[in-house]
Image (cartoon, rainbow, N blue to C red):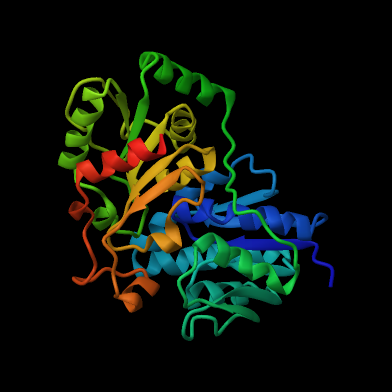
């Protein structure tokens, strides 16, 4: 069957949207003549700007979705449904593991709807991939194309960086001189999510900064907010756009981070990463680029992990020491 217009729906989370970009590249190869439209929250839409595998982006108000009243959510549903229905999509890929997202696609009159079946969450879809066993999220997204192509897909993520953002990154790099430049991802999070359990404590970043300084290295802090105490630190946390942060990461020697959007952005620009995991499973989320490593105490709470929940049986990021992280950094640099 020919598909002239294809929709991809992913409500948000910057890292999760970025992890769909290998799927998008493979989708473009499978349907080179189709128009591909990505429907996502405004918070995450910027990560897709200038992506060659996306023709258009429909961005909606994610604040109304995650924090709005019942009436605001109904209003958003109706407005977005009306807009999407006018598009006349032939095929839709529902990247969220949610029966609500599947119901929305069906309510928009999209005849073919492909997505995940986690228990009964695929009830409104026409084709499903079982989401259960531990496998990387990027590969799960790619698996949705198994109904349409047998071609092997790359797992490389894509992010476009402007010349202006590269110039900003160049200034950050020049301030570090010839020293190694480490990036720290402090804080983070997306609308509708509590990222605190995934973040490494600020005091641990401060200790790591001292260790880096003792080796003659310099540090740049990125992320939502905060700062690591110490010398030779540029604090840009809370002061950059997504694309500016991506450009700065591209000129760093490595990133230290929890399970965050910046972790995936750093992977997309190809720098070494030491990622620190607690409640989430690195086998589903950790960077796939070769010069990266992760630290995790492990967990046998597979049910919670499958649903992205946190319980008392999960390890804490604070259990990972600065010494362990520095050992990993030195091993990959």
Residue 328: quadrant of the picture? top left
Residue 186 seen by the camera? no
- Residue 81's image quarter? bottom right
Instruction: Using residue 241 as the reference point, say whether residue 321 is left or right of it.
Output: left
Percent from the top left, x then y, of residue 333? 41, 34
Rendered location of residue 148, percent (x, y): 75, 70
What residue is at 48 percent from the left and 49 percent from the top?
A: 44
- Residue toward you, 199 or 213: 213
Q: Between residues 267 and 103, which one lies in front from this camera angle? A: 267
- Tell me where residue 227 sits by quadrant: top left
- Image position of 62 (left or right of 298): right
Q: Residue at x 59, y 41 (%)?
A: 49
305 and 47: which is toward the camera: 305
Q: Picture coordinates of residue 95 (x, y %)?
A: 55, 66
The vertical placement of 119 against 218, above or below, is below
Up-down relation of residue 19 to residue 71 (above or below): above
Specify the quadrant that holds the N terminus.
bottom right
Residue name at image x 23 percent, y 71 percent: 311
**Do we see residue 229 in this rendering?**
yes
Q: Residue 316 location, x and y as percent?
A: 21, 59
Q: Determine whether, in the image, residue 285 is placed left or right of residue 155.
A: left
- Say which residue appears at 49% left-offset and 78% top-offset: 99
Number of marks in picture: 0
């Amino acid at each position: 069957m020919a598909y002239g217009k294809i929709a991809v729906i992913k409500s948000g989370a910057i890292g999760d949207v970025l992890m769909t970009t290998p799927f998008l590249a493979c989708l473009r190869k499978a349907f080179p003549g189709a128009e591909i439209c990505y429907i996502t929250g405004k918070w995450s839409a910027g990560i897709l700007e200038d992506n060659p595998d996306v023709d258009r982006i429909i961005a909606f108000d994610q604040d109304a979705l995650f924090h709005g009243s019942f009436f605001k959510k109904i209003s958003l549903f109706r407005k977005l449904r009306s807009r999407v229905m006018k598009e006349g999509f032939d095929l839709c890929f529902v990247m969220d593991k949610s029966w609500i997202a599947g119901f929305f696609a069906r309510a928009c009159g999209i005849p073919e709807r492909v997505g995940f079946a986690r228990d009964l969450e695929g009830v409104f879809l026409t084709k499903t991939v079982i989401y259960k066993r531990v496998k990387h999220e990027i590969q799960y997204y790619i698996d949705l194309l198994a109904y349409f192509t047998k071609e092997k897909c790359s797992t490389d993520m894509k992010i476009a960086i402007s010349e202006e953002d590269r110039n900003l990154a160049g200034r950050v790099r020049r301030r570090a001189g010839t020293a190694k430049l480490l990036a720290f991802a402090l804080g983070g999070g997306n609308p509708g999510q509590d990222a605190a359990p995934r973040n490494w404590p600020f005091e641990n970043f401060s200790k790591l900064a001292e260790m880096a300084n003792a080796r003659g290295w310099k540090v740049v802090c990125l992320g939502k907010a905060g700062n690591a105490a110490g010398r030779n630190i540029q604090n840009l946390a809370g002061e950059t756009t997504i694309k500016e942060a991506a450009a700065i990461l591209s000129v760093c020697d490595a990133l230290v981070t929890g399970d965050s959007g910046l972790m995936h952005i750093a992977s997309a620009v190809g720098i070494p990463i030491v990622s620190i995991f607690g409640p989430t499973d690195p086998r589903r989320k950790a960077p796939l680029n070769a010069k990266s490593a992760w630290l995790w105490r492990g967990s046998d709470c597979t049910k919670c992990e499958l649903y992205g929940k946190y319980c008392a049986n999960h390890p804490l990021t604070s259990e990972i020491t600065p010494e362990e992280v520095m050992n990993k950094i030195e091993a990959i640099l």
